[in-house]
Image (cartoon, rainbow, N blue to C red):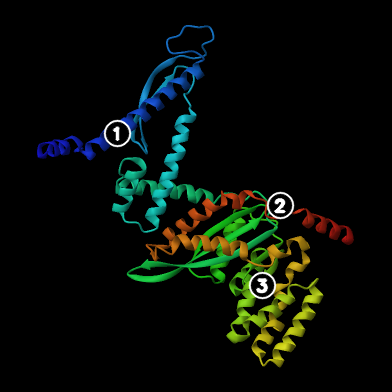
Amino acid sequence: MDNFTETRGKIVEINEGLVRDHLGEIVRSTVEDTLNQLLDSEAERLCNAEKFERTERRKDSRAGHYTRSLDTSAGRVQLKVPKLRKGTFETAIIERYKRRESSVEEALIEMYLAGVSMRRVENITEVLWGTKVSPSTVSKLNKKVYSRIEAWRNRRLEQRFPYVYLDGMVLKRSWAGEVNNVSVLIAIGVDEEGYRQVLGVAEGMKEDKEGWLGFMRYLKQRGLRGVELVTSDACIGLRESLKEMFPEAKWQRCIVHFYRNVFGVVPRQKMKEVSHMLKAIHASEDHQAAMEKAEQIATKLEAMKLKKAAKKIRDSTHETLTYYGFPDTHWRRIRTNNPLERLIKEVRRRTKVIGAFPDGHAALMLCAARLRHVSGTKWGIKRYLDMEPLYYKQAAQEDIVS
């Protein structure tokens, strides 16, 4: 019985490492063979004839092949890419894997910028590609992706953008052993057809007039035009820069930022009641009714001994009512900075794990990379507003003037 048990133990003993390596090699060689067969079939299709086949239908002939390595999830494979005598061999097979490789490259850059250690990056790429990448490879990928981001960031703005939203976010950067603030300024817009686009993103040392003036100049030099309404918070530097660079545009103060400003001088136990009052202002049917409602609420707040809140409403409510001069179907989406706030929230989700960036440029690149990604998703391809009511309103005003 003891001999049987011992023998049985030897029978079931398996070297798992050897089996895993063997299976991995089988998968890799299968992927390699399959891809090379697909390349041969693609070459036959382009030549309109099989290899060595003599036929009048033949359009081209082969001129050997060249070898290229391709890293796949099954490991590194060697492709024998056919060469043609007359034409250039182009195949969707290689392009498909290029797209996959490109997505892995983007993931590498994001991991690197997010502060993942180089050792972790090497281990992750071994899982994704089957091979590790070196620090020099990551550095090269950095430069490659940075150039693409810069090209997108500085692209020409060909369309008109009636609605523009502006805001900034503050990140941390390490500088000479100290951690300082760096501002990233962002602009999005709604074009003539009602689609949203990220118009620009740039670094600004501060959200002051100089920073905003430089940012708006950068937008204008790239072709931003046709701006009718700019929605933002009440940053003085932004407003002064707007008057200088886009004097024809009207300014809408974000009502959410306005509410927060009022809440700053209201006791916590009164905030809910005051919130209902403020919302009543912006639920009015027109500009005049809203101003009348604001005065009524200011008087009521004074009676509640909230004089500072009443003063803010009297002084600033008119800044939040510019949207009444535009189509009512647009009011809800142009009176707040929420479209841009949501984008910034998405960027912060990616940047908060880093803490402090090595420099302002790294911070800018990660923000721009994320914005570039989002702009290519449903966010940018789904119509945000029907712009026809705006054009009808403009045409009606022109008729009145004429």
| 170 over 156 or under it: above or below | below
Disc nearest the viewer among 3 and 1: 1
Q: Earlier in the sequence, mark 3 or mark 2?
A: 2
- Residue 236 quadrant: bottom right
Is the residue marked by circle 2 packed among few (<14), some (14-19), or many (20+) residues within 10 Å? some
| 200 over 76 or under it: above or below | below
- Residue 130 percent coordinates (x, y): 32, 40
The dot on residue 192 is 2
User: Badge 3 is on which residue?
Assistant: 255
Labels 3 and 1 touching (C-beta < 8 A)? no
Judging from the image, what secondary structure is the residue with disc 3 in? helix
The residue at the point 37 percent across, 39 percent down is 73
User: Badge 1 is on which residue?
Assistant: 23
- Residue 390 percent coordinates (x, y): 77, 57
Q: Considering depth in this image, is 223 or 138 the residue closer to the camera?
A: 138
- Residue 268 quadrant: bottom right
Q: Earlier in the sequence, mark 3 or mark 1?
A: 1
Judging from the image, what secondary structure is the residue with disc 1 in? helix
| 343 over 178 or under it: above or below | above
Disc nearest the viewer among 3 and 2: 3
Give the residue type at disc 1.
Leu
Tell me how far mark 2 sits from mark 1, CA to CA: 56 Å
